[in-house]
Amino acid sequence: KNSMSYLLPHLDSGWAVDQAILNEEERVVVIRFGHDWDAQCMLMDECLFKIADKVKNFAAIYLVDITEVQDFNTMYELYDPVTVMFFFRNKHIMIDLGTGNNNKVNWAMQDGQELIDIIETVYRGARKGRGLVVSPKDYSTKYKY
């Protein structure tokens, strides 16, 4: 098993997800929804694991298995192999990535610095009370749907 997922904390119930989002007052809560065994998730988890230490002062990263925890699948439309969402002080923070979907990152990012930039942007904007931030990079051309 070459998955990095075991190195990152898992939330294994809807209650645990709610608590993680509710109890974090200072940092952005980054949640990867998906499956540990999925190839796209493995890529994203590897990227998340690589940056976890660098962002730990302003972000808390968690993984949620969408088969084990189905509470949010309909609400957040978790139909992609991998979905990453951002929360700050119990509020879902949206990010304009240029893809037309501001709710989430729904592809596997492999560039750690790009991911750090996105999380930093979310953190800075959210602290100023913004519910929507604009990604430092436009991903509209890179990921065609």
Image (tube, helix red, strand yellow):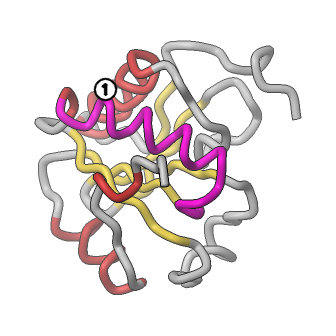
In the figure, residue 123 lies in which quadrant?
A: top left
Q: Name the residue at the front extreme.
A: 1
Q: Which residues are magenta?
A: 34-53
In the figure, residue 57 lies in which quadrant?
A: top left
* Viewer-side residue, 53 vs 55: 53
Which quarter of the rendered picture does the C terminus lie within?
top right
Give percent across and percent down for residue 71: 55, 84
Give percent across and percent down for residue 8: 30, 54
**Vertical placement of residue 20 versus 92, above or below:** below
Q: Residue at x 66, y 39 (%)?
A: 107
**Vertical placement of residue 72 versus 144, above or below:** below
Give percent across and percent down for residue 32: 48, 54
In the figure, residue 120 lies in which quadrant?
A: top left
- At label 1, counting other C-alpha atoms closer than 10 Å, the crowd grade (few under 14, some 14-19, many 20 or more) is some
The residue pinned by badge 1 equals 120
Give the SS element for disc 1: helix
Q: Viewed as shown, does residue 92 lie left or right of 95?
A: left
**Is residue 88 one of those drawn in magenta?**
no
Q: Residue at x 70, y 24 (%)?
A: 98
**Is residue 45 one of those drawn in magenta?**
yes
Q: Viewed as shown, does residue 17 lie left or right of 97?
A: left
The chief SS type of the magenta part is helix
* Viewer-side residue, 108 vs 91: 108
Give percent across and percent down for residue 26: 12, 48
Amino acid at pointer 1: Glu
Total numbered circles: 1
Q: Residue at x 37, y 49 (%)?
A: 30
